[in-house]
Amino acid sequence: MRLLIVGHGRMGQLVEMLAPDYGFEVAGILEIDSNPEGRGVTEERCRDVDVAVDFSTAQATVATVPRVAAAGVNLVVGTTGWGDREAEVREAVERSGVGAVVAANFSLGANLMNALTATMGRLLRDKDAYGAWIHEAHHKAKRDAPSGTALMLRRALEDVGYSLPVDVSSTRAGWVPGTHTIGFDGPAESLTLAHTVRDRATFAHGALEAARWVSGRKGWYTMQDVLGLASTAS
């Protein structure tokens, strides 16, 4: 299968390096200079491409994804920070009749944490004495705060009817690949669940697994679908 890489920072470079292990040939790479406002996406560039993997910037994703979808190429999108534009991007993908896996976090551990968060939220949603909080820490260069994963965890609570306020906080320092902690604090005890990334390669492995999975599919998916966790988290 042939892969188009959108964004060639640390994540894009990892995807490029690991692609052959997942049966992909890299058909092309779109970087910031070669893809202003998505104009690097052409019919020729997308010819015979099976899947595009996007780890770029929020602005680039909003401009690029509709063009890639219109070219008939399936997508995996790991860029965060564009949630306020999700409805229009999703509509463009669905109108084009392609498949897209869109996730704030592609690691197995983070997605298991999301499913467990939903379970905890269901069990504690009627326990007013237990207040929830989420804290995330990332490297100093990460642009969006709170992280897409922190927002995903909060949404998991909301989706199962946890209606108490959820305090979300962020730390940006050093070179932290990513740490997320969710806690429930009661009058006499606390319950916490944490996920810590040691190597960014886990995100690239997950994105390439998603790229294999979405090939030939149509519709809008998350990593929960790829891992078979969608029913667990609902």
Image: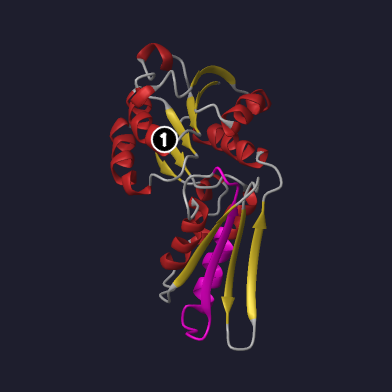
Q: Residues within 10 Å of mark 1 (few under 14, many from 20)?
A: many
> Which residue: 55% across, 37% down?
210
Q: Which residues are magenta?
A: 114-141
Is 188 situated left or right of 218 in this image? right
Number of labelled discs?
A: 1
Is 29 situated left or right of 158 in this image? right
Residue 188: in magenta span: no
> Where is residue 93 shown, x and y percent of the image?
34, 35
Vertical order, 194 against 217 (above or below): below
Disc 1: which residue: 99
Vertical order, 2 against 227 (above or below): above
Q: Nearer the viewer, residue 173 or 187?
A: 173
Res. 76 visible in picture: yes
Residue 139: in magenta span: yes
> Where is residue 130 shown, x and y percent of the image?
53, 81
Vertical order, 227 against 58 (above or below): below
Q: Nearer the viewer, residue 151 or 120?
A: 151
> Where is residue 125 shown, x and y percent of the image?
47, 78
> Which residue: 36% across, 16% down?
42
Is 188 situated left or right of 5 in this image? right
Q: Quadrant of residue 68?
A: top left
Kind of residue at disc 1: Gly
> Where is residue 55 shown, x and y percent of the image?
51, 34
Of the 4 image quadrants, the one containing the N terminus is: top right
> Which residue: 53% across, 59% down?
170
